Image: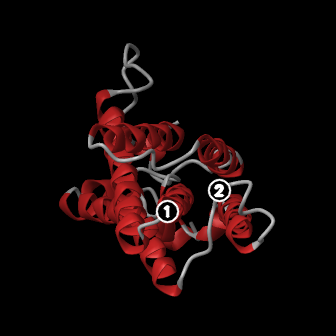
Amino acid sequence: LLYLLSCNIGEMLLMLVATLIGWPAPLVPVHLLWINLVTDGLPALALAMEPPEPDLMRRRPRRSNESMLSWSMGRVVLGQGVLLAIVGLLAFGFGYDHEGDLNEARTMTFCVVVYGELFRALAARSTVWTFWQLGPATNPYVFAAVAISALLQVSIIALPFARPIFEASNHTSLEWLVLVALALAPVTVIELVKLGRQFFQPTICRNARASGSDPDTTGR
């Protein structure tokens, strides 16, 4: 739920802010359709197969009258959506200033949003533990779903017959470097926030280790 909502909020904020500041639409309808297909499909299904988190039984239960989308989760959803919108706007600005080509700028934005959401799926497995603390082997479906979806996105740019369908263009080496850096930014921030919470709120880790379910010692 958190992953899907933050993806959609990020896309809406990207389009809204670009309109408010007078930019052309950074994404066209076919881009939005593809983004929803490739990021809300396999990765979301794979996340639904995630095993319970190690310290789940030591957390306080939810109040019976608490909404499924609590204020704390709402802040996380909004924050992650804002991160995605920011990197999307940076990608559009870079592509438009660097090439002066609207189609090139939209392609940059399109790819950054897709890869950014796919990378973020790896962090969406837990709100407490990082991807590497849980370990790739505990849910290989997520890794496989992200890899397959990323290859589908690469094929749009790499295959000449697919580019006109998605109004896409090929990237230079510099653009690929910028694209990957921007796409990795949201997941990096999210994982660093988790590590910061573990450092400043060590009870989270102590409780999990006391129960003998530390990810690092159980293969998670």
Q: SS at mark 1?
A: helix
Disc 1: which residue: 112
- Closer-to-camera residue (32/128): 32
Query: Residue 167: which disc?
Result: 2
Task: Between residue 114 and residue 211, name the one nearer to us.
Answer: 114
- Local packing at callout 2 (Cα closer than 10 Å; few below 14, some 14-19, many 20+) is some
**Is residue 213 in view?**
no
Circles 1 and 2 in contact, beta carbons < 8 Å: no
Identify the element where label 2 is drawn. loop
Residue at x 49%, y 38% (from the top left corner): 8
User: As drawn, is 155 to the left or to the right of 208?
Assistant: right
Of the pair 191 and 178, the residue shown nearer to us: 178
Whole-number angstrom distance, CA of label 1 to CA of label 2: 15 Å
Q: In this view, does 81 lie above or below 138?
A: above
Name the residue type under label 2.
Answer: Glu
Give the side of residue 195 with respect to residue 148, left or right: left
Residue at left offset 35%, top offset 44%: 18
Q: Nearer the viewer, mark 1 or mark 2?
A: 2
Residue 216 appears at what percent x and percent y? 49, 72
| Residue 211 located left or right of residue 193 | right
